[in-house]
Image: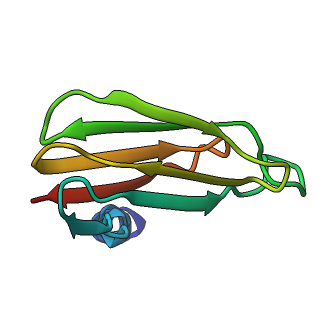
Amino acid sequence: MRRRLLLIVAPAVLAVSLAVPCLAVATPRFSMKIGSTFTVTGQTGSAAGKRTRAVGKVVISGRWGAGSWHVIATTVTDNGGNYRFTITPRRRGNLTLRIAPPDHKVRRYVLHLR
C-alpha cells in the first residue's frame, strides 16, 4: 500500500515543483528612439551573512538580438550599495542589458530601438 501511495504522490509533487519556475518575473521591455538615453539606478541587497548592503563593482553587459554578450560599462556602488549608469544606444534593433551587481542578483532589460 505504501509503495502505491508513493508512486501516486511522487509524480504529483514533481509536477508541482517543475511548475514553480514558470512563475518568474518577466524582463522589463522599453521602446525608445536611437540617440535617447537609458538610465538605470539600483541598490544592492545585503551581502551574504551581513546586515550591510553589498558594495563593489557593477558590470553592465549587452547583446544585440541573439548575439554574444559584451561589457558595455562598469560602475561602482557607493557605501550604501547605490549605483547608477546611463547608456545612449546608436543603432536599431533589440538590445538586451544584463546588470550584475556585487550581490549577484542580476537584472535584465530589453530595449527596442527604433
Vertical placement of residue 75 versus 7, above or below: above
Give me the residue at 27% from left, 48% from top. 96
Left or right: residue 49 compared with residue 75: right
Vertical placement of residue 78 versus 68, above or below: below
Camera sees residue 16: no
State the residue in front, 55 or 14. 55
Q: Quadrant of residue 19?
A: bottom left
- How did the renderer colour the structure? rainbow
Left or right: residue 44 compared with residue 50: left
Q: Where does the C terminus fall, quadrant-wise?
A: bottom left
Give me the residue at 88% from left, 54% from top. 52
Camera sees residue 82: yes
Q: Quadrant of residue 98?
A: top left
Specify the farthest residue to the front: 35
Vertical placement of residue 57 versus 114, above or below: above
Give me the residue at 32% from left, 38% from top. 62
Q: Position of residue 112 (x, y in %)?
A: 16, 59
Q: Where does the N terminus fall, quadrant-wise?
A: bottom left
Q: Position of residue 82 (x, y in %)?
A: 71, 56
Left or right: residue 85 compared with residue 26: right
State the residue in front, 55 or 32. 32
Give me the residue at 35% from left, 63% from top. 21
Left or right: residue 56 compared with residue 22: right
Specify the farthest residue to the right: 51
Tag count in the figure? 0
Q: Quadrant of residue 4?
A: bottom left
